[in-house]
Structure formats: C-alpha cells, structure tokens
C-alpha cells in the first residue's frame, strides 16, 4: 500500500492511499472528505467521484461535495426537535428556514485531526474532532471519528463513530458524488442503477419529508430492476418533477454489510460501484443544480453531473419514529459503516 501526503492549501492536507491494483483514494482533513477516487481503466486513470483541486475551491464553491456532514445530515423542519421532553432550536438556513446538515459552518469546513494506520491488507486515515456542547444549538460535547479505509481488494470503507456526554441527535453521512465516466461535463443519465429499496420518503415542495413512505413500484423511482437514469429524468413523476430528479431518502429492504444496497454502473460498463451499509436508508441526490454548477478541474460540471449515496437514517427521523431513531444516548458510542466496492472488467479484477 502506497501512502503519500501533500499540502492542499489554506493549511489543509491531502492524504493519498493506493493499493497494488492501482486504485487510489485521496482524502483531506478539510471536512474529513473524499477528494478523489481513481481506478485504472483501459490503461488510463479514471476519476470516479466529483471533487476540486484545492481546499480553497471547496470553501468557495461547494463545501459539501465529498465531505463528512453532520451532526445531522439532511434537513430538520424549522430547526426544531424534541429530546427528553425538551424542545431544542438549532440554527436554520436563511433561505429555507430549516436546518441543513446540522448548521453552517459544520463538519464540512472543520479542520480535523488525523492519523494514518497501515495494515497488511489495508490502510486507513482516521479523522477526529469534537463538536462542542451547544454548537448550532445541539446539546452535548460530541466526539466524532471518521475512518476512511482502502483495502487490497478494492473497497473504500467509511466508519463513523460518535460519543456524546449528553443525549443528543447524531445522523452523519458522507456526501460523495459518483460520476463513473471520469468527466464532470457528462450527466449521469446513461449510468445504470440498481437499488435494494421498495419504499421512499415522500417530500414536500420545500424538500421536508411528509412522514409518508411511498412504494416505488410503478414509479420512476423503482430501481429494483436495473435501469438507466435517463428513464428517471424523462419521466413526469410528480416527486421527480418536484426537485428535477431525486433528492429523496430510500428505505433499504435489507441493511448490513452482507447485502448490497445499490449497484451503480458506468455507461461503458467497465466500472461499477457496489454499496453496502448498516444504515437503514440512503439519500440519492442527482445533483439537480440546473445551470448553477461549479467548475471542476477547469470544466463546468453538467446538471445531473453526479449521484450521491448518502447512507444514514432517513432525514425526518427526529419527528417520524417510523423512519428510525437518530438519538445518541449519553456515553453510549454509535458506529456506522458503509463500503463502496469498486469493480472493473479488467485491471481491477
């Protein structure tokens, strides 16, 4: 396993892990984020995720891309929730009046401490930081650890652990965007998706869940049989039209690292990513930015230029118990793990 570090600008570092198959994972202490994931395809190096070339670009263009987000990924309606009989008011976004990703600036712009651990068959970068009691209105001093691991058998694993000295809410995720063409100017409509989910969370017009779980059967959100995303984008399904794609929580029919949650395949079918997670849902966001897309590596990103697999408990769980629980009990650690298995027809076999 090859390991290297270099300056990423603004006082942040970029750490790169590479296995013997040529799969390369780059992460940064800016937001404990993934910056790059490349694989050898047809004798060349292909980028599989969206990202920027410097810390400055993340801070000025879009701090969420690839980042660890929390304390609570997703939206909390009006920034209010009840915990142990007490109502808490957390910071809200000025535009929507809802809490987004736990408040800004959040996990995504923090400078995390880190260590590198190298084993026989894998290497990890372990990021740690503390969110202080009362930050953005959340109770408890919360210690967070995010471990990015690259294995010899082509798995990128994210393990996230939280420990608080008070009861609080904790529902983090990684905000990776996949585009398996290696070209951010190409939309993902020709990618194929299979998803182990029969139900999704219905959204209101302001992207807050209604609390209803709707069946995917008979809708454009049915990926229980693999199909290209172009079929989704061409549909007139009302929930698709609401956000010009997907920005929805999907409830997994089978959670755990022994089951596949999703399979995402490149248009040329030379690369696919298999997602496994112990989380109960995954938020799929089809980068519905319209014309307001950032420039990456000197090129303007396409609308629908990436797809997220935000593994977590479904946003809205703080008010809808049927979605699951995001309560973190005092002094009881919570750990969640997601694996992205990178498969290729040739070099990565």
Image (cartoon, rainbow, N blue to C red):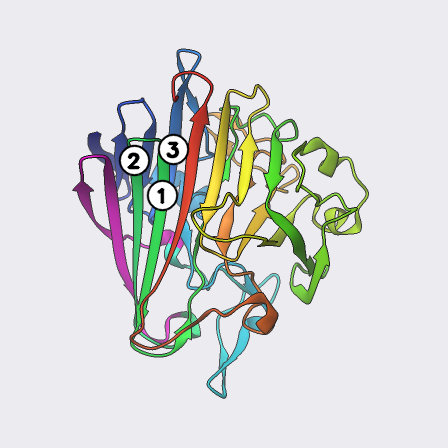
Q: Earlier in the sequence, mark 1 or mark 3?
A: 3
How many numbered marks are there?
A: 3
How many C-alpha atoms fall within 10 Å of the one at disc 2: few (<14), some, or many (≥20)?
Answer: many
Query: Residue at (47%, 19%) from the top-left corner?
Result: 345
What separation in Å lies between label 2 and label 1 (alpha carbons)?
Answer: 8 Å
How many C-alpha atoms fall within 10 Å of the one at disc 1: few (<14), some, or many (≥20)?
Answer: many
Looking at the rendered structure, the secondary structure element under dot 3 is: strand
Whole-percent x and y of residue 67?
A: 41, 48
**Mark number displayed over residue 36:** 3
Q: Are marks 2 and 1 in contact (CB under 8 Å)?
A: yes
Residue position marked by numbered label 2 in the rendering:
151
Q: Is residue 56 left or right of residue 276?
A: left
Q: Quadrant of residue 192?
A: top right
**Mark number displayed over residue 157:** 1
- Residue 176 is at least partly visible in this image: no
Q: Which residues are magenta?
A: 108-135
Q: Earlier in the sequence, mark 2 or mark 1?
A: 2
Extreme residue toward the top, this view: 43
Query: Residue at (51%, 32%) from the top-left corner?
Result: 295
Q: Nearer the viewer, mark 1 or mark 3?
A: 1
Residue 112, magenta (yes or no):
yes
Q: Nearer the viewer, residue 213 or 104?
A: 213
Looking at the rendered structure, the secondary structure element under dot 2 is: strand
What separation in Å lies between label 3 and label 2 (alpha carbons)?
Answer: 16 Å
């Amino acid at each position: 396993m090859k390991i290297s570090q270099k300056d990423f600008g603004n006082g942040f570092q970029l750490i790169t892990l590479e296995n013997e198959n040529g799969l390369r994972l780059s992460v940064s202490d800016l937001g404990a984020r993934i910056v790059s994931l490349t694989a050898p395809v047809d004798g060349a190096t292909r980028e599989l995720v969206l990202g920027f070339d410097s810390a400055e670009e993340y801070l000025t263009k879009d701090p969420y891309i690839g980042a660890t987000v929390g304390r609570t990924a997703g939206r909390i309606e009006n920034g209010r929730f009840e915990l142990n009989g007490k109502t808490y008011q957390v910071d809200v976004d000025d535009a929507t009046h809802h809490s987004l990703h736990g408040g800004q600036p959040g996990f995504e712009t923090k400078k995390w401490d880190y260590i590198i651990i190298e084993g026989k068959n894998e290497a990890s970068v372990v990021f740690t930081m503390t969110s202080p009691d009362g930050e953005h209105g959340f109770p408890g001093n919360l210690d967070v650890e995010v471990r990015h691991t690259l294995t010899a058998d082509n798995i990128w694993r994210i393990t996230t652990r939280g420990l608080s000295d008070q009861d609080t809410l904790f529902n983090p995720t990684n905000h990776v965007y996949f585009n398996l063409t290696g070209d951010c100017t190409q939309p993902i409509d020709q990618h194929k998706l299979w998803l182990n989910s029969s139900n999704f969370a219905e959204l209101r017009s302001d992207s807050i869940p209604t609390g209803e779980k709707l069946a995917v059967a008979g809708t454009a959100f049915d990926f229980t049989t693999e199909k290209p995303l172009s079929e989704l984008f061409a549909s007139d399904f009302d929930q698709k039209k609401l956000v010009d794609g997907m920005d929805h929580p999907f409830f997994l029919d089978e959670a755990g690292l022994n089951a596949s949650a999703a399979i995402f395949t490149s248009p040329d079918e030379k690369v696919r990513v298999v997602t496994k997670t112990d989380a109960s849902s995954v938020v799929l966001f089809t980068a519905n930015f319209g014309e307001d897309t950032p420039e990456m590596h000197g090129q303007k990103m396409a609308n629908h230029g990436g797809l997220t697999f935000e593994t977590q408990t479904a946003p809205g769980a703080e008010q809808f118990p049927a979605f699951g629980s995001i309560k973190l009990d005092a002094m009881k650690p919570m750990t969640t793990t997601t694996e992205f298995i990178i498969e290729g027809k040739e070099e990565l076999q």
